[in-house]
Image: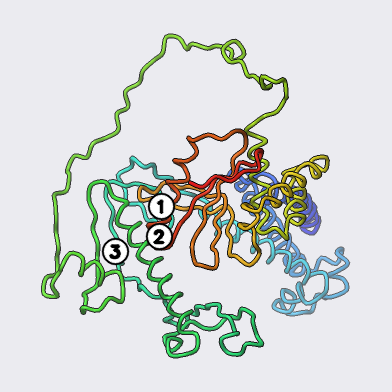
Amino acid sequence: MVAELGFILLIFAFVLSAIHLFFSTRVCFINFSEDNFSILRKINFSICLLLIISFLFLIISYVLSDFSVLNIYNNSHTNKPLLYKVSGTWGNHEGSLLMWLAFLGGYGFFLTLYTKNNNKKLNISANADAIQLITIHKSKGLEFDHVIIPFFDWSLDNDTRGGKEKLMWVNLSKFDSKYNIPYPIKYKSSDQKSLFRDDYANEKNKAYEDNINLMYVSMTRPKYSLFINAENTNGKLKNVSDILAKSIELSTNKKIYKRGQISKNPSKAINDKFMLKSIPSFSWRDRIMVRMTSESGIEFDNYKRGKKIHDVLSLIYNNEEVDIGIEKAQEKNIISIDEINSIKKMVEKLMSNKEIKDFFNPHYKSYNEVEILDRNGDVFRIDRIVQTNDNSLHILDYKTGKIDKNYNDQVKNYKTILSEIFPKNIHGYIIYVDLNKIVSI
């Protein structure tokens, strides 16, 4: 009877294993949830319990010498000592398999029990009275009432301590003119005495700029108070703590620097709600009329056409690459196959103009779609800048349609911004594409 009970328990364990396979697939690949994971945990416990009890029933059958079980009949007899009868349970092929199944069931149960609390999350709202731990990089664009920077000590230079490696790319032509290829070398202080001292200085300047920007980000997050734990400075500018001490003129004897007062009752956002009694709504079709034709009856969309011409010309760097630029424009779906011939004729007509053609000389340095910043941080994009052999800069701005003096101020603004960056002779021009004419500003 004991053996039959053990066999029935094994059947139940097999059925539960099939159910476990279904739910584990659902949890891992379809819909992970704590409810599904809880079901898995219960099934694992049941499988483990059934296998252990079944194995215990087999041990009892060995102890009682139940020879109605073929496994006991082949591997035991009545004259065996009790210890040998018990150990004989797993001393054969079938018994050892059942023992390992019991072990695996127990392992699965304890594994799910161990991971019971690993998937729980603590969600803290911004209004909760708690400290939020966050990296400086992740805090970009965010704002907090109070900020604590516990480790204000990162190096201004690239950190190569503790086996860290920093690579910089150099051109081997400085070593041998035959090898005009980029190559990575280790960034280290001894590079400033090598052939690559200019590359080292450039990489060092970039590292200083990045770490000072990081310093700026960390110090501009708070609204009401900022607490910084900085290192003692020795007068040398090696890390951000040295810059801070230098900027606030903190002496080495003074340990604490305090400025301003902490607001005890920071202003809170106003949560007043206003209800609208009605929301006016009108159909734009009844209010806006779009005219898609000119007075002469020619149908075109000026904005789209102008943008398309700008995009095509931005891919042409000199008069020898007209076909290449138009081909790229077609590959990028800027123009269709049917438009290639008309666009090509228009560009070739521009290049035939001697006044315009000189600004597409392949021997000059040229830059298309150049973004510049003014003192207010506003971004402007110049269609083309050409640097001629006399080291002067020429600004080209593409326009379609008729000559309009309102465009002149735009080019003058470009010249003013560039003059603050490059102390060179700067000239400005507007190229009217449809008129095949260039106007000096």
- Nearest to N terminus: mark 3 or mark 2: 3
401 with respect to 58 (left or right): left
Indicate which disc, 3 or 1, sits on the residue closer to the N terminus: 3
Indicate whether 377 appears above or below 249. above
Q: Are marks 3 and 1 in contact (CB under 8 Å)?
A: no
Q: Quadrant of residue 255?
A: bottom left
Which element is circle 3 on?
Answer: strand
17 or 368, which lies in front? Answer: 368
To which residue does mark 2 refer? 421
The number of numbered discs placed on residues in the rendered structure image is: 3
Q: Amino acid at mark 2?
A: Ile
Mark 3 or 2: in front is 2
Q: Nearer the viewer, mark 3 or mark 1?
A: 1
Judging from the image, the colouring scheme is rainbow
Which amino acid type is marked by label 1? Ile
> In the rendering, at what x and y percent does residue 130 appear?
31, 48
- Residue 123, compared with residue 104, is above or below; it is above
For numbered disc 2, what is the local secondary structure?
helix
- The residue under the point 70% across, 20% down is 296
Q: CA distance from mark 3 to mark 1?
A: 41 Å
Tag 3 residue: 150
| Quadrant in the picture for the N terminus | bottom right
- Circle 3: residue type: Pro
Mark number for residue 417? 1
